[in-house]
Image (tube, coloured by chain):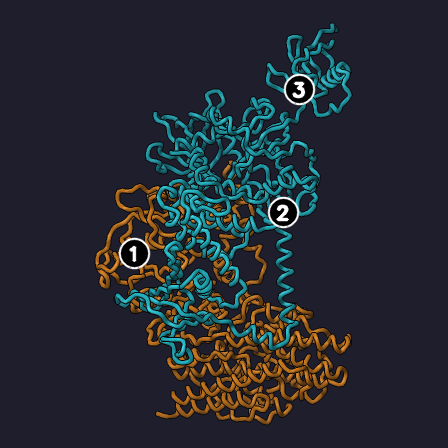
Chain colours: A orange, B cyan
Amino acid sequence: MDDIDAMFSDMMQEMDLLTQSFEAETESAPLPKPPSIPAPQEMNFSIGFTDLNASLHDLEDNDLDALMADLVADISATEEKFATERDTFKGSAPVAQIPSQPQSNFNLIASTDTSRPATSSNSIAAPPPPPTSKPSKEELEEQMKADKIKLALEKLKEAKVKKLVVKVEITDGSSKTLMVDERQTVRDVMDNLFEKTHCDCNVDWSVCETNPDLQTERAFEDHENLVEPLSTWTRDTENKVLFQEKKDKYEVFRNPQNFYMWKKDKKSLKDMKDKDKEQLLESSCLVLHFWVQENFCGASVIVPDLEGILYLKEDGKKSWRQRYFLLRASGLYYSPKGKTKASRDLVCLVQFDNVNVYYCKEYRIKYKAPTDHCFILKHPQIQKESQYIKYLCCDDVWSMTLWVTGIRIAKYGKQLYDNYKAAVRKAAGSATWANRTIQTSSNASTPSPTPKAKAANGHASHPAVETKGPGNQTSFPPPPPPSMEILPPQPPDPMLPPPLPAPSSTTKVNKFPPPPQFPQSSIPPPPTDDLPPPPPPPEDAEQPPDFLPPPPTSMTSYGGAALPPPPPEPLASLPPPPPAPQNFASAGGAPPPPPPPPPPPAPAPAAYQPTNSVRKVAPSPPQRTTPQLAAPSGGDFMSELMTAMQKKRSQP
Amino acid sequence: MAAWDLTVTVEDLGPDAPPLQISVTSDLHIGGVILKLVEQTNLKRDWSDHALWWEQKQQWLLRTGWTLDKCGVHADARLIFTPQHKPLRLGLPNGATLKMRACFSSPVFRTVMGICRVLNLRHPEELSLLRPVEEKKKKKDKDSSEELYDLTDVPLTAGSVQALYNGMPAHFADSPKTEAVYKMLSVSLPSPAPEAIAKLYRPASIVDKTHIHTRWLDSSRSLMQQGIQENDKLGLRFKYYTFHDMDPKYDAVRLTQLYEQARWAILLEDIDCTEEEMMLFGALQYHIGKQSLSQDMVSSCQGMDDLESALKSLEVKMVGDGNSTDMLDNMTAPELNDHLKIFRPKRLTLKGYKQYWCKFQETSISYYKSKEDRYGEPIQQLNLKGCEVAPDVNVAGQKFCIKLLIPAPEGMNEIYLRCENEKQYSQWMAACKLASKGLTLLDSSYQSEVQNIQTFLSMQRSSSAAPTSQTDESINTHSLVSPRYQKKYKPKQLTPRILEAYQNIAQLSLTSAILKFLQIWQALPDFGISYFMVRFKGSRKDEVLGIANNRLIRIDLGVGDVVKTWRYSNMRQWNVNWDIRQVAIEFDGNINIAFGCVNADCKVVHEYIGGYIFMSTRARQQSDTLNEELFHKLTGGHEAL
């Protein structure tokens, strides 16, 4: 393992150097540069590798393989980009001489800079003026200078992006490893996991963290960032990230009456049921719209008016004390003995700004709790038993769910409902109950104007109004390099067919953005200097941008700037690509699975040819020794790393 | 047809002038009567606003086409010829009194629409007029001296689109006087003196609260019909607590007045809140007050937005124009370096504070044994991201401490930083505050944060130095909380607590601070409930009925506990038996309730329920026009039909 670590730190240094050189470049006046030295391509990966390094410790070899595939894909995509750009540049160089050079550099950087959120890439894509208009030199220079500065700022920002390698355990006992970027939300991560696991995308799926020390479990909310909480784990942590279905995650939106009318005794609810089931179904739909709308769509969120007796573990003691608790939007309160329940007499136990709520397991044994239905409130960074944790215990599971859900509503407010809507959109295809929330009961039988009004209010159309296609994620930060999602996560499959030289050109089609120029590399490409890369060929239309993260962002950003964006296919509608080896063999047509590495001697521009192979999967280290002229350092390190791993694996 | 004499008093002839006698026949229509009347007065003036008021019957004769016979006017009728628009003193939600002309002949609903049009308040259906609390006689003398804003000269424009001029509706831009009125309407007023709050009427119990709502005027009848005279005082308030389509761009007045109403509701303990909530309300009031003062005259919110975006783009430009070295200078985050005393209570030492050389960089504090050691390894580095920062300050005692609760896997690390003086404190405090949110000293809000802390400190200085007599400039924190908390805490205890809450909201803009205030107000459990004392059918005791925007609540009068809740969504129909003045409501599942009102007119209750149902229909309508007919249908009762 040590040599791998060393490798990584070396690589990191290398990248540091590269960034520095790049900075130096941007600072200097826009001198014409030999086009064969495109600026630091591999900047795609951030410099913040320290965490990566740390998290690599925990990885198994096969995880490393998958990860490698990721990284390699990243690099190769980048390099290809450069190849495209370079080619286009060659063609256009005579037309617009000096000014166009940095120009092309910009385009290229903008397009390689894939993992940046849409806004920033837009800002880059937008400014470059078309050189064809031939503005005065000064203007151009000024413009370029400004662009460079902006770019430098962007780069610096980018360089700070933190990434983590996360191992996610799945309910069936298996696990997936993926790289998570600091800017990704849990929603993004789950979208990746959906692709990886091919499970139904129902709204209950959650990413949870468990803490064996505290015996807690908490589902991350969809809008949270994953990297931040994970990076506060301690070094020797036994915490885990789970991917599982959690029924109570969005239960409040499916059966709001259970949360907002909890006071109604169960008997009367049951009676209602017995009375007329059909009518209940109908009216519950109505009620549901009504409730959700009323409680979550107003100016402020109405927190369920929960109150009742809970046990509170006394500070620093082993005893648990009964108190009468009340939930308010501003915090969790209890009413001291002998006082009324009036607001003025309440004592605030905790406010929710800095704490999260966690479910606990088996506290009867651990802390002598009255029941096992406990939850705690703590600062997310606290990982061990502490006086700063509030321990609470409920009489039964249901009241625990009520309280925890209520606290989540108080803490996250409308965000929770937005998350839910997004999750429903995602699940729209597969889940049937989602339809129920959308449908309006037109034959509502209530004569008083209210319900009708409420129902017609448009809540019904709410989910529909959000017009974004279910999987159209162009607005999301791109998912982490997904190539490994498609691949079988297992160690190199010996059955993989050997590299096929002939289809190498066809396989390139898969590599999304710069499709044409590889086959045509010998012909000078059209002078599309200021234009974004040509739209993908028709075969690619099937391929949603999400499969190849780096290119799509650039594509979309271009789309925003000038070009019609590539047809974004809803993610949900995509059949998960079977990772069968046959697909590899018949490479051309099947977009997702990256083909196995082709041998070096492919007919392409010498400098950039190898990039094709880089795109290929991890398992073939020996071939990876091909020199990578475009990115000498990065490429070399990658291949060396591979070799090292290979060596290690071969050792008994 | 025989002619007979009709007696009409023309008010414009003076109070002592005898009534005019005009000779009419029963088939003469009202327009004809007015024509004859005007001819007889020999006064040349604009009579178009005048109409006939039949005092005995308490009704206007507004249909000029109707004959006297049809109206039922006979020789014994005493009519008064009087203007339909008369001046009225309006008590606004912010406590100011505004004199303006209002229509005395149309239903109150329409009168309010007219008033709101002048005041530039959108969605007038949410407001209504109510009679003021009877004031004691001896206070009356003082009232004459109260500041009165006057808008009586402003003509009532009929439905025209409000043109903006200088960021305010054109009719306010006429004179400095009217501009001042607009400022009063659209900018929240400074906090009242704590004594003033304590003096005002506060409902002590839920029964008191039921009295407030007995005073609403009937929306379907005119002011004259309800005994309101010229120059009488009425309160204008938000009546229905559903605020539709709130848009800071257009709703400067509406937002401000709503904020004022909410603020007074909290200060006067109309609505209960917890201590924590009160501190936050106090901090927000302080912030809003300060922001309003600094806001130059009446710059509309839109203007502010423009300015902000302009500043932003300027900023970008500057970054772009500056040479790269400048930029890099900017990129390297500034630091704070100073001697500070640090105390860690966890270590159970009695030594207390010890001096270290501290460096604040990015979001961390590193401390060294001495200044000379600063290039070596720090004794410790504290990353403040995600930590809790609390002030521990006593200006009088020259104690400036920052309490940090830094989360760690084992729990929270408690650390105190002691600063020498205000300046040092405000710098380090601001830095800690930003760092806890993950921001560095580079953040643009740093300087304003430093200033905020300094002003707050100076506030504490003045209030602790002279606890009894405040100068006008300083705000006493007592004026930010209700009398209950004024009694509970001294200013010097209160100030740090408000300061603590203040830190979380100090970055908000004026508009977002107001919105935040309203949001917290709306999240209070008792928000938006109007109380009425009722007696349920079959019950022998009085109970309280709470009417909210989505439900009816039956409340026990003695304890104040909620007995039962019914939601409008389950409501099938409601009826009023006007003869026995009883409201009967049927809910899904054959649930029927009926009650009579004890101290309020049951028309008020009926109107409240119908009004809320009307409010809930609004979202459907795309157009801005108000469906007046529907409102009257839902709230009018038998008179409207």
Q: Which three-letter amino acid code belongs to the residue tagged 3?
A: Leu
Residue B576 placement, left or right of A36? left
Q: Is residue B307 left or right of residue A635?
A: right
Residue type indicated by callout 2 = Val
Residue at image position (33%, 35%) is B559
Residue B213, above or below A70:
above
Where residue A592 appears, x then y in whole percent?
54, 77
Foreground residue among B554 and B448? B448
User: Where does label 3 land, which residue?
Assistant: B61
Q: Which mark is residue A392?
A: 1
Residues beneath discs 2 and 3 located on the same chain: yes
Q: Earlier in the sequence, mark 2 or mark 3?
A: 3
Q: Chain of mark 2?
A: B
**Quarter of the image containing the C terminus of chain A?**
bottom left
Asked if residue B323 can be seen in this view, the reply is yes
Asked if labels 1 and 3 share a chain, the reply is: no
Q: State the separation of the CA atoms marked 2 and 3.
A: 43 Å
Residue B149 located left or right of residue B155: left
**Front disc: 2 or 3:** 2
The part of the image, by quadrant, that contains residue A178 is: bottom left
- For the residues marked 1 and 3, what is the alpha-carbon distance in whole angstroms? 70 Å
Parent chain of label 3: B
Query: What is the x, y in percent for residue B220?
Result: 58, 28
Where residue B502 appears, as percent x and y from the top left, is 45, 54
> Mark 1, chain letter?
A
Asked where in the image residue A205 lies, by quadrant, the reply is bottom left
Q: Which residue is mark 2?
A: B298
What is the secondary structure assignment of the residue under circle 2? loop
In front here: A408 or A584?
A: A408
